[in-house]
Image (cartoon, rainbow, N blue to C red):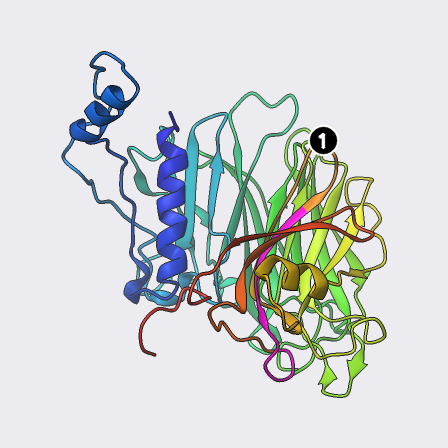
Amino acid sequence: MKKPWTVCLAIFLGLGMAFPMMGQNRVHVAAPTAAKEVGEMENKRNNLPPQPVVFQTNALSIKNLGTSRNAYSNAFGIRQNIAASPSTNSVVVVHRANTPNSSGTVKADVSTDGGANWNVDKFTAWNNTVATNAARYPRATLLHPPGYSQGPLLVSAQPVLNGTNGSWGGLGLSVSTLNGTTLSTQTFSSSPGRDTMHQIPEAIVSTDSKVFVLDKNGDINSTTFNDILLLTTGTWNGASVSWSRQFISLPTGTGSNGKANIQDMTMAFDPTGQIGYIVALTHTNFISDTGSTNLPVVLKTTDAGVTWSSPVQLSINHSVNAQLGLSTPMIASTGYEVSATVDFAGNCHIVTHVGELSGAFRSITEPGKSGACQFKTDGNSLLSSRLLGSPGSLRGTYGNG
């Protein structure tokens, strides 16, 4: 039987994908139930005696989470403002505060029983003490430091409005216990020389002792990506988390239809925390793939994020056409969101929507010519691919508009 937090988390994320821009940012989390009739039918089918019903049949319980001043607590696609810890049955949601003068403050909603009960606005994860600390779009992960016995730690990362990169430029970082004790708070701000230019974090991920916050480095008002990633790494030092910056080259090249931007990025590590991947939907190689397509590009680390490989663009045309069973091959281009995980063998599994190329760096979702695909890579080449399904739409948009 699935633990309640896993089901709640799945439902929570499903709602987020279907309605990424809900008014006032109210998220309804539904508690799981099991109908007595379904259980009895399963028992008869498997020749089993009557079994006790685990959950009640009163369908749903509703809890409003993530109540911020407006819908812009979690804008710009599906981002990571929810974090879960299976080993401790903890789930945390971070969001902006719902007070007129503190909309730049980040609050934390906490459940320690797998999502059955919630303490909304349990504590402040980031405090808007001055105007240049005003936060937006918080991201979160739960850290389990080796030797630390006080439960998981919430690490909250959010861009702040310090005005050095458009309105943006700073990165607010904080570490808290789930009881609200602050262990460390720090703001990384852009330098006067503008070599460090934070935008809105693309991903946040943690291993046992490290936290990684991935961002694009560059002028937020620029229409093109400037080929530099900004990786902020937090390392547990026994009492708090210390932070450092790293610049990573990701040249996206220039084709006949111009320079590629990064549509989306994510990160993932294996269970040891040593092997990890940065996965970007972009285009870096106009020699092997000349078309202006969005393709999975991976960078790999084998030393816990200290060094990273050169980017490798995965050629997916042949495998996608084979998976879709197309007699007339199409040029495949990915959609605009990506997820990834790393298995015990150190291979990365990438999930994204793929469709037929339709103009420069665009794809369509025509039935039979698109689908959600999983790609497996070792960081050097495409090892395998699999069609997961063929939804009629992408980006969580349904109906008109």
Residue extending furthest toward the top: 49
The image quadrant of residue 315 is bottom right
The image quadrant of residue 261 is bottom right
Q: Classify 378 as above or below 84.
A: below
The residue at which mark 1 appears reads as: 272
**Closer to the camera in the image, 29 or 71:** 29
Q: Determine the residue positioned at 65% across, 32% down.
A: 208
Residue 179 seen anywhere in this rendered image of the structure:
no
Q: Determine the residue positioned at 46% across, 66% down.
A: 394
Predominant secondary structure in magenta? strand
Q: Position of residue 10 (x, y in %)?
A: 40, 43
**Closer to the camera in the image, 309 or 255:** 255
Q: Position of residue 392 (x, y in %)?
A: 42, 66
**Closer to the camera in the image, 34 or 310:** 34
Queried whether the magenta region covers residue 335, the answer comes back as no
Task: Name the side, left or right, on which 213 lies relative to 99.
Answer: right
Question: On the rendered image, what quadrant is the N terminus found in?
Answer: top left
* Dot 1 crowding, Cα within 10 Å, few <14, some 14–19, many 20+: few
Q: Determine the residue positioned at 53% across, 35% down.
A: 153
- Where are the magenta residues, as a range? 349-361
The image quadrant of residue 15 is bottom left
Q: Position of residue 35 (x, y in %)?
A: 19, 31
Residue 16 seen anywhere in this rendered image of the structure:
yes
**SS for tag 1?**
loop
Q: Determine the residue positioned at 69% across, 66% down.
A: 295
Give the amino acid at mark 1.
Thr
Number of callouts in the render? Answer: 1
Q: Position of residue 126 (x, y in %)?
A: 48, 51
